[in-house]
Amino acid sequence: MLPEAFAELEPLAESGWCLATEAERVAKRHASTEQELRHFYDLMVPRLEAVIAYLDAFQLDKFPEAEKQLMSLLLSMAEVTFAVEKFDADESTYEGLPANRFVPVHDIPAGGLYTPFEYK
Amino acid sequence: MASNPKPLELTPLPSDLGYRWREKFAQIGTGPVSIEPAISPQWFEWEREAIFKRCWLTVGTVDEIPNPGDYIVREIHAARASILIVRARDGEIRAFHNVCRHRGNKLVWDYKGSQRACAWACRFHGFVYDGKGDLVFVPEEGNFKEPLCGKLNLPPVSLGIYEGFIFINLQAEPEESLETYLGPIAAHLRDYPFQALPQRYHYQSFQRSNWKLALDAQSEVYHVPYLHGQTWPKLFNRPDRPHVESFDMRLYNRHRYGNWPGNPHYKPQDVEVFALGKYSSITRLGEINQPTGPGINSSNAPDWGFDIVHLFPNTNILILGGVWHTHQFWPLSENRLLWEIKIHMPEAQTAGERFSEEYGRILLRDALREDGTTHEHTQEALESGAIDSIVLQDEEMFVRHNYWAVEQEIRHWRDGVRETIE
């Protein structure tokens, strides 16, 4: 699934962290346990600069499939970094609005039907 | 922000801290502020008529519709209007009421898009309008008593553009020109290269809150070390200015401008240091990072953090080094709100820059989600009737001005009088 050079990150891909949209990535972060977030962070930190250097050799947003998966993993790392470094991986004290009430409209394709995001 | 290589020179606190704005702007009041405008359905009906149906409203930027055929739709719920804004074949940007002249169907149903033919067809019976709003095709037109094309055109809406910002006005004949309406705030839009940074991200949040309560939270920094204590520790507040005490505040009759410090000593955490530093696209921008001119960073402080330009009634433009946001607060009722945020920043050119902007956006988004919680809790608490007013400290002068400016607009519409700031 991932480029061969990053085989040790494969468990993260297998546990569903290669996600295309911001809404999916933040939902996965909030659904993860403290241990899962730490596991992701600890696996990724030593390879972070190598991942970025590797992906920087490609044209952004024109990645082949494996590189595309690696890029989405890198973006998930941004979510995980926030949880681990700001909240010590335990976001139980975070009291912001649920992520699904803060809608990333930029991930909705242009021309898609306008829905005013009803809430109950 | 932290990524900028800045001198460590810190601007000292002024000697009149704590009462300087109260003394300067005493005429907008110094006492408690009534909460009625945040909870009263009657007050909201006045706001509809006096403000949202009469004022110039910011509805977007020209980079949202760069090519002929591009369009956006803005739902102005408070004025019960849906507005279609198009770029026509001649390159001109025009606004229309989004309503088919045949039987009144909403003409365009999505919120943005592009029609390469520069023509918009009604989904109901196929009436087609061009970018000048002219009706150009009617199926079986001969069945109507008389020809319709060129006659039954889209109702136009007044539109103005200033420094790339698109404004509309829903009065049939606006009582003020856009230039007059903007007045002195226009100077604060001229010294920053807004259009050099494209719109990249867009959020919407529907909230159970009066629109002014949400605007209030984006109008002061007093709350940052408390509400955002975990999400933004020391990002802006620093030991010599623990509550990010402002450099400058300017209140105009409707609009306002403010200038605040940053924290050049902020130390990002382990991975954050990469996201905000080494890989940040902002660092390659040069002078946009530290803009100059009388209208931006008006104190010319080396430890500048951000400016807020408030365009009455409902738009805040937040300007930081290399990034700017619009925050718009669109009321649906006296206690329902659509909060819309658009983020303008450089186009990421590498994977590292893409990672950096993702992290920076999460840093913003998750603090704004915390603001959202207070909007709703405050609305609920105010509606309980337990208190009838709020109190404000000197650094919350924008909040006081928010209520004052709204009230002046209502009095002007209802009674024909308004106070002005000298």
Image: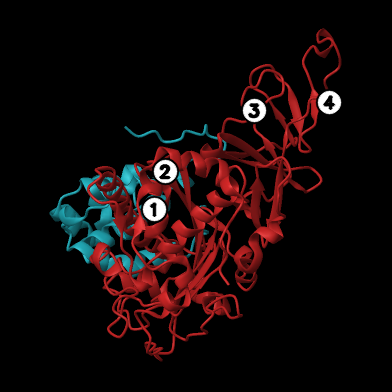
Chain colours: A cyan, B red
The answer to whether residue A7 is left or right of residue A60 is: left
Closer to the chain start, of discs 3 and 2, is 3
Instruction: Give the numbered dot on residue B337.
Output: 2
Closer to the chain start, of discs 3 and 4, is 3
Quarter of the image for the C terminus of chain B: give it: bottom right
Q: Are marks 2 and 4 on the same chain?
A: yes
Closer to the chain start, of discs 2 and 4, is 4
Could you tell me how far apart the alpha carbons at marks 2 and 4 are, in whole angstroms? 38 Å
- What is the three-letter code of the residue carrying label 4? Lys
Closer to the chain start, of discs 1 and 4, is 4
Local crowd size for mark 3, using a 10 Å CA cut-off: few (<14), some (14–19), many (≥20): many
Q: Are marks 3 and 4 on the same chain?
A: yes
Task: Give the image quarter of residue B334.
Answer: top left
Q: Which residue is mark 1?
A: B214
Could you tell me how far apart the alpha carbons at marks 3 and 1 are, in whole angstroms? 31 Å
Quarter of the image for the N terminus of chain B: give it: bottom left
Q: Which residue is mark 4?
A: B151
* Image point (75%, 29%), residue name: B129
Instruction: Give the numbered dot on residue B107.
Output: 3
The answer to whether residue B62 is left or right of residue B216 is: right
Label 2 near label 3: C-beta < 8 Å?
A: no
The answer to whether residue B397 is left or right of residue A28 is: right
Could you tell me how far apart the alpha carbons at marks 3 and 2 are, in whole angstroms? 25 Å
Q: Position of residue B421 (x, y in %)?
A: 56, 68
Q: Nearer the viewer, mark 3 or mark 2?
A: 2
Asked whether residue A21 is in view, the answer is: no
- B16 or B217: nearer the eye? B16
Label 2 near label 1: C-beta < 8 Å?
A: yes
Label 1 near label 3: C-beta < 8 Å?
A: no
Q: Position of residue B300 (x, y in %)?
A: 52, 84
Q: Farthest left residue?
A: A35
